Image (tube, rainbow, N blue to C red):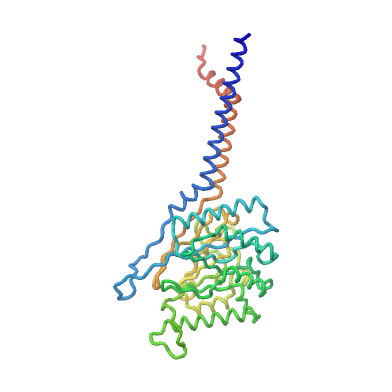
Amino acid sequence: MATIRLGFGRQNFCLLKRRSFLLLKLTAVVFAVLLFCEFLIYYLVIFQCHWPEMKTPAYGGEKENPEPVLKAIFLADTHLLGEVRGHWLDKLRREWQMERAFQTALWLLQPEVIFILGDIFDEGKWSSSQAWADDVERFQKMFRHPRHVQLKVVAGNHDIGFHYQMNMYKIKRFEKVFNPERLFSWKGVNFVLVNSVALEGDGCNICSEAEAELIAISHQLNCSREEHRSTRCGDGPPLPASAPVLLQHFPLYRRSDANCSGEDAAPPDERGIPFKERYDVLSREASQKLLWWLRPRLVLSGHTHSACEVLHGAGTPELSVPSFSWRNRNNPSFIMGSITPTDYALAKCYLPFEDTVLIIYCGAAGFLVVLILVHCGLLGSPFLLGWNLLRKPKTT
């Protein structure tokens, strides 16, 4: 009887040991997959991005000293989900992706300034005061940054509404949080940040004020280009004598994305769809005004969620920056710019593809299922039977 009890105890011990070993293996696999998909993959992908180098040495004219290079990141259309259209699981997944991508890029790339080209929020155009405060709190957590790194934003139609939804309350609420500057200069580089939603051209008070601001900035830029300042330029400190970089949410007018290409351009079946003025792109009139007033050397915009490169007027290049969120793209990205007062170089940095992460999770789930079935002896028997059949000698 004692021998039987001892054998039964050993059998239970072996069974418990096998189950514990299985649980340990399952835990190790789950932890490894989560660690890779939620943390390490961002370092692995963004580590491959590098700041672009100037095609020519960064020298200004006949100066002996090289011009300082400003390292800037441009991203767009984060669309933080709100309380109305945002499911908690969707918000958790997409916001974690953007937070990890942003924080990893900060750590690996060490930018000096970051520009977000509008549509920071998804429901800012109609959110209540409490919902707005909650969204802002989440944004500040996700896009936290050191004090020496500057974060600049422009308003998008989802932040303050389209022209027919926009009002001073929404604009002031946005400006109270982000304190946007219309003209920003650093290291000799001028940036003009435009509220493109206000360029409707119908003479409304908000639109008139926006145009007046741009005309004043145009005057400042023209004065900076003069070798001998005239009396009309005033006595204030002059701006750097550098053609500006224009930043806005709506792209300048173009008929469609038909001439856009690349893996992050709009899908082929959507590229030929004509754009609506004042909805998909700025109007022809507003676009011409911006080019005439500011004479930018480069334009960057968002809104379309897809990449595109176009030339305007006398050859002014514009880049549409794709969305930064998995909710809008399977392959989000951002632009890295090395900029001097006289030159610039741009490069694109892709984030992890969402379907890559999903495939890894599906593969890991399948592996766990196989592991459990093998442990339970439900998978080994068919394989063993097939192997024995193959080994069975043929009879004649």
Nearest to the observer: residue 321 or residue 317: 321
Residue found at the very far bottom of the displayed protein: 231
Residue in front for this viewpoint, 168 or 334 = 168
The foreground one among 49 and 267 is 49
Q: Position of residue 50 (x, y in %)?
A: 41, 57
Q: Residue furthest front?
A: 2
Q: Is residue 387 above or below residue 259?
A: above
Q: Position of residue 116 (x, y in %)?
A: 54, 65
**x 50%, y 81%: residue:** 218
- Confirm whether residue 86 shows in the render: yes
54 lies left or right of 357? left
Residue 108 quadrant = bottom left
Q: Residue at x 58, y 37 (%)?
A: 365
On the question of residue 250 being in view, the answer is no
In the figure, 136 relative to 243: above or below? above
User: Where is the N terminus found, in terms of image quarters?
Assistant: top right
Residue 248 location (% of width, % of height): 55, 70
Q: Is residue 140 above or below residue 252?
A: above
| 293 to the left or right of 164 | left
Q: How many marks on residues?
A: 0
Q: Residue 94 in the image: x percent, y percent?
A: 59, 53
